[in-house]
Image (tube, rainbow, N blue to C red):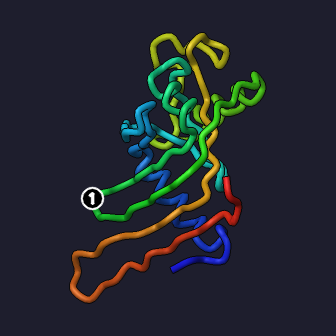
Amino acid sequence: MDVASFAEIEAEFMERVKRIAWCTVATVDTQGRPRSRILHPNWEGTTGWICTGRHTLKTKHLAANPYVSLSYWDQKHRNVYVDAFAEWEDDPAAKRRIWDLFKSNPFPYGYDPSIIPGWTAPDATGFGILRLTPWRIELSGLSMEPGVVIPVQVWHSGKAR
C-alpha cells in the first residue's frame, strides 16, 4: 500500500537499515547489464550516503546510468527496497561531514572510514561519497507464522528524476 508521506514509514525504515546496515546495490554497466555489490549506506531521512571508492567500475556504471537499486534483507525477512538517483558528492566540507557522520554512528550502522586501506581522511585520493536521492522506498516482509501478514508499505517522492 502506498503511504502519503515518508514520515509514515521513517521510524521502521531507520530501524531496519540501522540494524541490517549492509545492502545489495545494483547498477547498470555500460552495456546495459545489471551488476550488484554489497555496500553500506547511512541515511539522513530520505537522503542516503555511501562511502566508496571514487575510481572504480561503479564510477563508470554511474557515469553511463546514474540509477541504483538497493535491497536490504534480514533472516526474519524484513526487507527494504530503495530505487534512487546516485551522484558523487565532491564538496570537501560535505565529504568531511559525511565522514564524521559514519564515524559517529554506532556499529554496525556506523564505522570509521579510515579502516579502508588508503582512506586516511576525507580528502584521500580515491575516497568518494555517493549521495542517494530515492524516488521509491518499500518496506515489506514475510512472516513464517500462519495467518500473520506483514503489509507492504511504499513511499514515492513524487519527483521524477
Across and down, in percent, residue 22 comes to: 41, 43
Identified by mark 1, the residue type is Gln
Judging depth in this view, the residue of 26 and 43 nearest the camera is 26
Whether 95 is drawn above or below 44: the answer is above
Tell me: 150 left or right of 127: left
Q: Residue at x 56, y 21 (%)?
A: 54
Q: Residue at x 64, y 67 (%)?
A: 6
Residue at left offset 66%, top offset 33%: 98
Count of numbered circles on the image: 1
Q: Which residue is mark 1?
A: 75
Near-viewer residue (28 or 113): 28
**Left or right for 141, reference 50:** left
Q: Is residue 121 above or below residue 143?
A: above
Q: Quadrant of residue 63?
A: top right
Name, please, the residue furthest toward the front: 31
Q: Position of residue 101 (x, y in %)?
A: 64, 36
Q: Nearer the viewer, residue 78 or 136?
A: 136
Q: Position of residue 70 (x, y in %)?
A: 45, 49
Q: Quadrant of residue 8?
A: bottom right
In the displayed orientation, state which residue is furthest to the bottom: 147
Residue 1, given in percent of the width and then of the height, sits at 51, 80
Q: Secondary structure at mark 1?
A: loop
How crowded is the residue under tag 1: few (<14 C-alpha within 10 Å), some, or many (20+)?
few
